[in-house]
Image: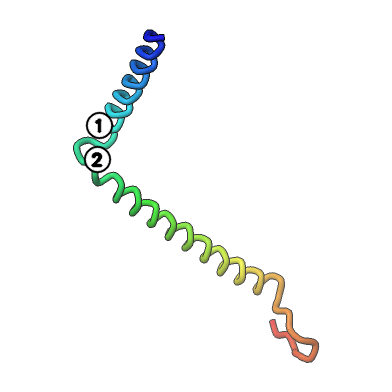
Amino acid sequence: MAAEDYDSQLLESVAVRRRRLRDAVLFGAQRGRRVADERIGKAVAGLVIAAVLCAGCVGWSFVSHRVIGKVGTPGQVRTR
């Protein structure tokens, strides 16, 4: 039973060491700034996605108005 505990502790310590080394290689000495940078990046990505969706809606509205034509009430005269 002691050998199983030692093995699990060893595997856990190796996993922690690998994660720390990976973080050190990826983020360097400024690991604390990582959280703020990720949040800013996600906010900018959200704004870009929202802008693209809005532009797509405006473009679709323009194209459908031009190509399909304006649907009016029965008493209106359509001009082209």
**Looking at the image, which residue is at 48% across and 61% down?**
50
Residue 70 placement, left or right of 47: right
Q: Label 1 amino acid?
A: Ala
Q: Are the residues tagged 1 and 2 within 8 Å (C-beta)?
A: yes
Instruction: Find numbered disc 1 in the image and state the secondary structure of the residue it sits on.
Output: helix
Q: Secondary structure at mark 2?
A: loop
Q: Position of residue 36 (x, y in %)?
A: 29, 51
Query: x%, y% of residue 75?
Result: 79, 91
Q: Which mark is residue 24?
A: 1
* Left-right relation of 31 to 9: left
Q: Residue furthest front?
A: 1
Residue of label 2: 31
Residue 24 on image: x %, y %: 25, 31
In the rendered image, the residue lying farthest to the bottom is 75
The percent position of residue 19, horizontal first and vertical second, equals: 32, 28
| Towards the viewer: 11 or 72 | 11
